[in-house]
Amino acid sequence: MAGEQAAPGPRALVLCSGGVDSTTLLARAVRDFGADNVVALSVSYGQRHARELDAARAVAAHYGVEQRFLDLAAIFADSDCSLLAHSDEPVPEASYAEQLDGAEGVVSTYVPFRNGLFLSSAASMALSLGCSVVLYGAHHDDWAGSAYPDCSPAFVEAMARAIAEGTGGELRLEAPFVNENKAAIVAEGLALGVPYELTWSCYEGGEHPCGACATCLDRAAAFAANGVPDPALAPRD
């Protein structure tokens, strides 16, 4: 009937760290749901620097989506993970494969069950905001060799079941990149016109990425595989 407003479309909450994977996922969500129906959730967990949160703000502003912030730092106060600001442990300057070679357990940059905590918090917030889906950017390179077990397909499937069960089927979890490597994600992002120059992946802070930590190495390889320079490394005036 004339004068009736269309029913609002489905809404999505995207865990947005400001890095390559979550930014590509945010771009996909904006394409699929529309910017007005996307919420970016960025989490402070006591990380070594604020660069990734600054990047998340820039990315959310670029796409014109609502952004929410959550501070969970107190939960990790007793962890000695090298990614945390209070830790004296150095961030390893080696790839994930090199770190895992001959080692037992996870890499030193694994924050204890971080993604389980993030996803549980995201589910609660998503329901409160009227979202029907939580989008999570876990990908193959992060769980290969069990570097980050809370990125694995088994973990994603378990969390998806828990979220569906715990919300009475009102909310679902999707991790569309979980079986893709970062090179494939970058390829999709390039096609979507993702502003990778706004993103930050390095485990260290500072003005420029260190180029030596595992996530810097992984990122560099992904752009190289696509035959393009990483725009985040381009000189700026």
Image (cartoon, helix red, strand yellow):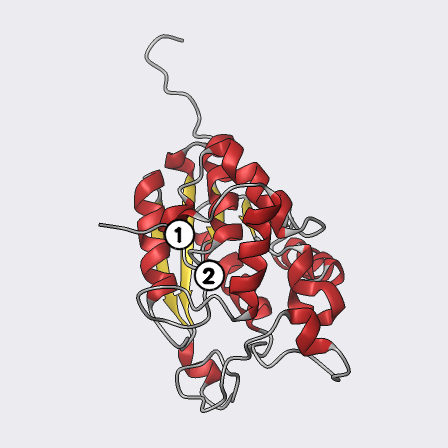
Say which of marks 2 and 1 sits in front: 1
Residue 166 position, x and y percent, is 63, 59
Q: Marks 2 and 1: CB-CB under 8 Å? A: yes
59 left or right of 225 in image: left
The answer to whether residue 201 is above or below residue 132 is below
The answer to whether residue 27 is above or below residue 40 is above
Who's the residue at 62% across and 46% down the image? 225
Where is the N terminus found, in terms of image quarters?
top left
Q: Please state which amino acid type lies under the numbered disc 1.
A: Ala
To which residue does mark 2 refer?
201
* Viewer-side residue, 47 vs 73: 47
Q: Please state which amino acid type lies under the numbered disc 2.
A: Ser
In the displayed image of the protein, which residue is found farthest to the top? 2
Residue 84 position, x and y percent, is 45, 81
Answer with mark 2 or mark 1, whichever residue precedes in sequence. 2
112 left or right of 236 in image: right
To which residue does mark 1 refer?
232
Q: Give the total of numbered labels.
A: 2
* Viewer-side residue, 11 vs 104: 104
- Between marks 2 and 1, how big is the CA–CA gap? 9 Å
